[in-house]
Amino acid sequence: MIKSLSTNPYSDQKPGTSGLRKKVPVFQQKNYAENFIQSIFDSLEGFAGETLVIGGDGRYYNREVIQKAIKMAAANGFGRVLVGRGGILSTPAASNVIRKYKAFGGIVLSASHNPGGPTEDFGIKYNVGNGGPAPEKVTDAIFDRTKVIDSYKIANVADVNLDVEGSQQVEDMTVTVIDPVADYAELMESLFDFSAIRKLISGGFRVVFDAMSAVTGPYAKEIIEKRLGAPKGSVMNFIPLPDFGGHHPDPNLVHARALYEIMMAHDAPDFGAASDGDGDRNLIIGKGIFVTPSDSLAILAANAHLAPGYAKGLAGIARSMPTSGAADRVAEKLGIGLYETPTGWKFFGNLLDEGMATICGEESAGTGSNHVREKDGLWAVLLWLNILAVRKESALDIVRQHWSTYGRNYYSRHDYEGVDSDAANGLITALRDKLAGLPGKNFGALTVETADDFSYNDPVDKSVSKNQGIRILFRGGSRVVFRLSGTGTSGATLRVYIERFEPDPARHDLDTQEALADLIAVADELAEIKARTGRQEPSVIT
Ligand code: VG1
Ligand code: CO
C-alpha cells in the first residue's frame, strides 16, 4: 500500500443530482479521480471488511477508473469488491447487486445520457447500502472532504483482469468479477409475466429496442431477444462502445430520432423503446404515438397491478416536482399517497424504503419502483410489455383511453444549454424576487394562482431541501417551472417545464407546442429568457 500526496485537489463542484460529472480530460488530470474516490471513502464509516460494488456504463475511461477504484478499495480496507465483467454494470443493475449481496455501497462510473469519448463526459457517483444514490448529507460530506484532501491510499499492484468471471486477490481484498446481466435478468423475471410477453411476441407483436450503443445492449439482448423470444435484430445498437458510436445516448425525440422515425412509419413495429448511457432512463414510443415520460408514469401506475410483481397494488406514487400532474389523478383515483419531491432519484429513497411509495418517476424519462433504488429503463419497457400483453390493446389505444378517463396533461420541457452561468443565475434570482407579486396577476386568459420556489420537507428524515425550482401555477392546473440543471458539464442549462391540463377529450388531439403556446410566451415574459440568455429559442425541446 502506498500513500501518495495529492498534487491536484479536486475542488470546484458540488457533486450534483448524480455524482460528479466532468469532461474526460479533467478526470485524466493527475490524482483527480483518485482524490474524488478517496473523498468518498473518507466520508464513509464502518466499511472495513465490507463489500463494495463497482461498475460503469462502458464509456471512455471506464476501465482505467475501475482499476484505480479497486486498488484504492483494497488500500482503504474493503473486504471484497464485486465488479461487472468488462467493467459493465447499468445503474439499476448496480443498485440490484448492492441490495442482493448486501454490499456496503457502490461506485458507478457514468455520466448517464451525456456523450462519451476522449473529450466528452465522465462521471463518478456513490450509492449507499440501500442501492440508491447517496443522500444529500453524504454528497455534502464528500464535497467538503474534496476541498481539503491531501492524500489517498492505493495498493501498488498489477491491474485486475476484468474480462474473466471469478475471484482474484488484491492484497487482503477479494475481487469477484460477476456476470453483469444475470442477477438483473432474474429480478425482471420475478416481477413480470415473461410467458405472457413471450406469447404476445410469438403472436407477431413487433418490438424494437434501441440501446444507443450504451450499457443496456447486453441486458436487452438477453431479456428481449433471448428470454422473451423477440427476433434477432429487435435490439439495435446493442454493443456498448466507449464513445457510444458517436450517439448522444439520451433517449428523447431529438437524440433517438432514428427510433422515432421507425415508429412513425406506416409499417412501424408495435412498440419501440430506448434507454440512456447508464440504463436508467426510458423512451416509450407506441406505433404512431410517443408517450411522454409523465404520461408513461401515470399509465404504468394505473396498470401496474396487471404485472405479477405489483398485483397487490401500489402503496403510493412519487414524482419529481417538474413532472406533470398526470400521476396525481391516478393516485387520487386509487386512493393512495402522492409525493412530490425535488428533481433527482435520491429523494425517492426514503419513500421507497419506508414503503410509502411503490412507483416513482421523473419527467426526464426516469421511471422505477421499489425493486431497486434507482430509476430503471428496461424495467419500464418490460412493465409496458406486460401491460400490453394482458390488455391486448395497442399502446395508442391505452394512452387515449387514459386521457379520456383522467384528462390530458400537455407537457413539454424547453432546455437552454450552455448558457452563461451568471446570466442563468441572474434569471433565477430575478424570478425569485418577483414571486410574491404574482398571485392574482393575469396574463391574457391565464391567472396566476400561486408562485413559489419549491422547498421539500422529507417526511421520513425531516430534512429540508430549499430552492428546488421556481413554479408558477395558474388557475385550472396549468403551470410553468424554471430550474437550473445539476448535471451539465459546460456553462449552465436552464430548464423550463410547461404544462397544461386539458380535461376535454375533444381537445386531446392538439399539437403539444401549440397547446402550450400561451404558456410558453408567458414563461419568456416572466423570466426574460431571450433578453437574459441571448437565445432566441431552446436548444432542445422534449
Ligand atoms: C437531470 C434530470 C433529472 C435526473 C438527472 C439524473 O437532472 O432533469 O430528472 O434525475 O438528470 O439523471 P438535471 O439537474 O440536469 O435537470 V441520469 O439519467 O443522469 O442518472
Ligand atoms: Co441515466
Image (cartoon, grey):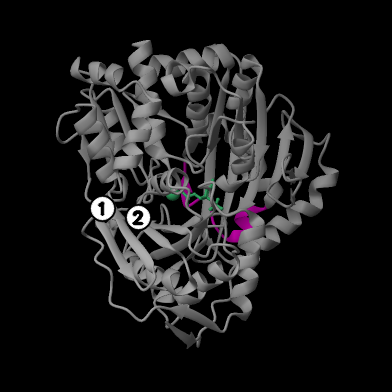
Provide residue 231's location: percent of width, then percent of height.
15, 29
In the image, is residue 143 above or below residue 31? above
Q: How many residues crowd around disc 1 within 10 Å: few (fewer than 14), some, or many (20 or more)?
A: many
Which of the two labelled residues, at mark 1 and mark 2, occupies the earlier sequence position? 2
Taking the magenta stretch, the answer to whether it contains residue 534 is yes
State the mark number for residue 203: none
Q: Is residue 48 left or right of residue 30?
A: right
Give the CA separation, mark 1 to mark 2: 8 Å
Residue 174 in view: yes
List x then y, in percent, for residue 71.
Answer: 38, 73
User: In which quadrant will I find the N terminus?
Assistant: bottom left
In percent of the image, x 53 and y 38: which residue is there? 363
Q: Nearer the viewer, residue 344 or 424?
A: 344
**Which amino acid is tagged 1?**
Pro
Residue where numbered disc 1 is placed: 240
Q: Which residue is mark 2?
A: 57
| Residue 525 place in picture, x, y as percent | 68, 46
Q: Is residue 537 visible?
A: no
Judging depth in this view, the residue of 154 and 149 nearest the camera is 154
Asked if the residue under mark 2 is in contact with the one under mark 1, i.e. CB atoms within 8 Å, the reply is yes
Q: Quadrant of residue 44?
A: bottom right
Residue 421 on image: x %, y %: 60, 66
Q: Which of the 4 image quarters holds residue 118?
A: bottom left
Q: Which residue sits at x=47%, y=85%?
A: 3
Residue 39 is left or right of residue 432, and the answer is left
Residue range of the region highlighted in magenta in the rendering: 528-542
The residue sitting at 33% across, 34% down in the picture is: 186
Residue at image point 29% right, 47% down: 212
**Left of 296 or right of it: where is 147?**
right
